[in-house]
Amino acid sequence: MKTAQHSSGLPRLRARRLGLQSQYEAIVLMHRDCPVCRSEGFEARSRIELSHGKHSVVATLLQVDEGLFAHDEAGLSEAAWRKLGVKDGDLLNIGHPRPLASLSAVRAKLYGRRLNGSQLEAIVSDIVQERYSDVEMATFIAAFASQTFDLTEATALTSAMLSTGDRLDWSQPIIADKHCVGGLPGNRTTPIVVAIAAAAGLIIPKTSSRAITSPAGTADVMETMTRVDLGLDEMRGVVEREGACLAWGGSVRLSPADDIIIRVERLLDVDCEAQLIASVLSKKLAAGATHVLLDIPVGPTAKVRSEEAGRSLARNLEAVGLQLGLTVRTTLTDGSQPIGRGIGPALEARDVLSVLRLESDAPTDLREKALDLAGQLLAMVSGNSLATERQRAMELLDSGKAGAKFVAICEAQGGFHEPPTALFTEPVIADDRGLVSHIDNRRIARAAKLAGAPVAMAAGLKMCVRLGEQVRKGDPLFILHSETQGEAAYALDYIRANRDMITVSAT
Amino acid sequence: MKTAQHSSGLPRLRARRLGLQSQYEAIVLMHRDCPVCRSEGFEARSRIELSHGKHSVVATLLQVDEGLFAHDEAGLSEAAWRKLGVKDGDLLNIGHPRPLASLSAVRAKLYGRRLNGSQLEAIVSDIVQERYSDVEMATFIAAFASQTFDLTEATALTSAMLSTGDRLDWSQPIIADKHCVGGLPGNRTTPIVVAIAAAAGLIIPKTSSRAITSPAGTADVMETMTRVDLGLDEMRGVVEREGACLAWGGSVRLSPADDIIIRVERLLDVDCEAQLIASVLSKKLAAGATHVLLDIPVGPTAKVRSEEAGRSLARNLEAVGLQLGLTVRTTLTDGSQPIGRGIGPALEARDVLSVLRLESDAPTDLREKALDLAGQLLAMVSGNSLATERQRAMELLDSGKAGAKFVAICEAQGGFHEPPTALFTEPVIADDRGLVSHIDNRRIARAAKLAGAPVAMAAGLKMCVRLGEQVRKGDPLFILHSETQGEAAYALDYIRANRDMITVSAT
């Protein structure tokens, strides 16, 4: 990164570590009357470039009147401190950052124009270098969410995201992968499918994201049972030993732009198809995958709402994959209600464990869906019939081999432990008898998030009913789990105002 | 506003004023391990509701590790401090804010759906109550900039913005107003038109905005010569005395949503037609106008780039005006190059003064355009022919009556003074002889902003050439004005990299 411009002759300020957590955006606090603010015309919210030696960072300025800071101090947030690599009292050069040329491409996209490869590369490169402020990130995400895109653009965005990070090479002809595009609470098949596939001898180095707009991502769920923040070498070691891993993608710099984008999408509760495609496929390509099975749940309150939209997304994913040398197979699945019982990291982990441990009360829907997907993945790679490979998947699960493989993977990642349990539980009961006729995935997910998921690992909902089931007055519909009373009260408020998130119709 | 939820039983924190300037967004700093963060699961960037007595504010949380804050302190930005009306040490209740329901309407708009009146009212009301974070504001603006809208939506948005602020009643049958949709540097006709119209006996209580994405708004220009932050009663007094005012709209709570929106649009350098219409017309309606003349400059680098786009915008402005009982007349004007010589608050003020003072070197284009507009405004109200009223406008200007009226308005607003002069000036000269064949308004404006305008009042550019003029090698194209050397250097870097912002073609 270039160092700050026009810093020559300007007074330098002394770095001061504030221990300030501001998530992704770097922040600097300076006295409003400090010599740099005065000479450079900086005001609150100005973007400022700070540099020290070879390191530099672009930060958002907040100004302070009196008391907290001396006139020659620059107080740095942790994000800024890390990027500069300074110690307290080091002298910083301060100046205007070079204008962010890629922002005009973001504006062009916002107004509906197509972007080319070099524009997309410039955007992604600036994002990865953390040159975008949070407000600029929000505009970028909104621009992409609001506009249509073509395959050339989606392919170029995928390439740009791929090229800004590391790319793994496993020196194997076939590397399998499996992914769900999301939007269905509790749909935690990945750990089971990976365990079965690895038990069948496939190489499947799985990296997962944390939740974007959902109460849990696979990385959040795995983190309740083992370490997921593996470095590249650690990941390689785990895969060499067990043929698979279940790691968080963010700590290995595979498509790092995606991790930054995802954090802002989560804040805004917005996502978009072009980014979804680029996000999924760049991560798979960076992880070295050659064959990917994609689960696309379709339902009125899932992320993909109609068969037609699902087929279109499937076509686009397969087409972009083809452009980039990745074999993609897609499967549209039932997204009308949550899968399994738990919604939230630890509660979903318990479902996964009960299927792998062959417990008698393991959720049947989760087991069957995981077997379907595992069969498809094995068939995709082997060329055998789906029936043959589904049978093989079932044998690997029922023999306990998949369960043993799962524990072995966790042990290789740093040790297996049971998921945590919530401090507070509260049943939410049916007001009347009748038939469960509708479950709103989005509001169910929102309730789980208000209860604290995914940050509070043990928080979420445990479903007690499924579509088509009879309930009596007073039967529990689900149990709310939370780690703090504040969050429990907050979620219950929402649930009371949204009783129809589960519709019970008189019969 | 409702007070914070679930605050009962939670520890309260002591308010501490930080003197922290963060522009529009309220910020609270708390210790990461403070009892409230722990019990409520708050993390960096969480939105938090703080309340004290009847007052409350929703703020963005930044967390600090150690040193700066005690565990029981909440450090407040100035925006938060003002809204809460507390003093140091007052105990604050802290909790989760109620979910911002209007954000789902913002997301719906982002995905291309139409919004109805109640959705738009909810959004505007939340914005005025400052419940939106900066990231949420950015998403709102991007959503509106990216999507088409229909007249029903534009009318409803205008009504919503109108209904959240004050509305002036002048008890007069005809209240005139004049506005330019912007995008043309130096186009500062308003002070001249208002002076002529008031000298002709019209009632014209003009409120203007500050610059959005330009180097100066009319309020910025007027502020270099007099006070513009008039309260409602002051404004009324000025208009009663002189028939007109030239005030900043933001200090009188006319369409306050607009002022908040404009600040974020400026940060993003984005604007959109629906908001432009709602912004302009809600301000005019709130100011009590009955007849409005709108100047729409059209040119390849103006805000409106084609005659067709100009006519469409004109139709939409007139149609929404009609729906809301406002007579709107529009005029498409030449937007191919800046008007007058100055670009930047004080430099534009000098142009205005030289026209009003009938100085021999006053810029002819500014004088002629102001006379055209004044003639149209007088004709619109009187029903007389345009020729008659333009002649009348010229007589009022050339007799010195308009100039005297302008000074009288400034005196009534708190006193007239000459605009300030820049500390640093630097000519930018022609590299070769030839004909000035193209002037890029956008890059000219950007150079003026980099030089410090509008925050640095005296900063900007003074144009020395116009389209079609012959220049010799070494002739000045414009003079850069700035208040600090840092800003001068920054602007010159940009100018050197963008020499073709003024094209001189060999003849």
Image (spheres, coloured by chain):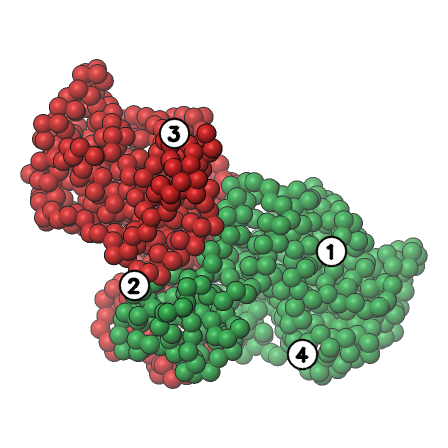
Chain colours: A green, B red
Q: Amino acid at mark 1?
A: Asp
Establish if A456 lies above or below A153.
below
Q: Residue at x 33, y 54 (%)?
A: B452
User: Which mark is on residue A227?
Assistant: 4
From the image, state whether disc 3 or disc 1 is nearer to you: 3
Q: Amino acid at mark 2?
A: Ala
Describe residue B359's horizontal placement relative to residue A59 as left or right. left
Describe residue B351's horizontal placement relative to residue A73 as left or right. left
Instruction: Determine whether label 4 and label 3 are within 8 Å by CB.
Output: no
Please tell me how many numbered marks the rendered image carries. Answer: 4
Q: Mark 1 falls within which chain? A: A
Q: Position of residue B317 (x, y in %)?
A: 35, 30
Q: Residue at label 1?
A: A295
Q: Amino acid at mark 3?
A: Gly
Establish if B505 lies above or below A156.
above
Describe residue A51's horizontal placement relative to residue A280 as left or right. left
Q: Residue at label 3?
A: B468
Q: Residue at label 2?
A: B79
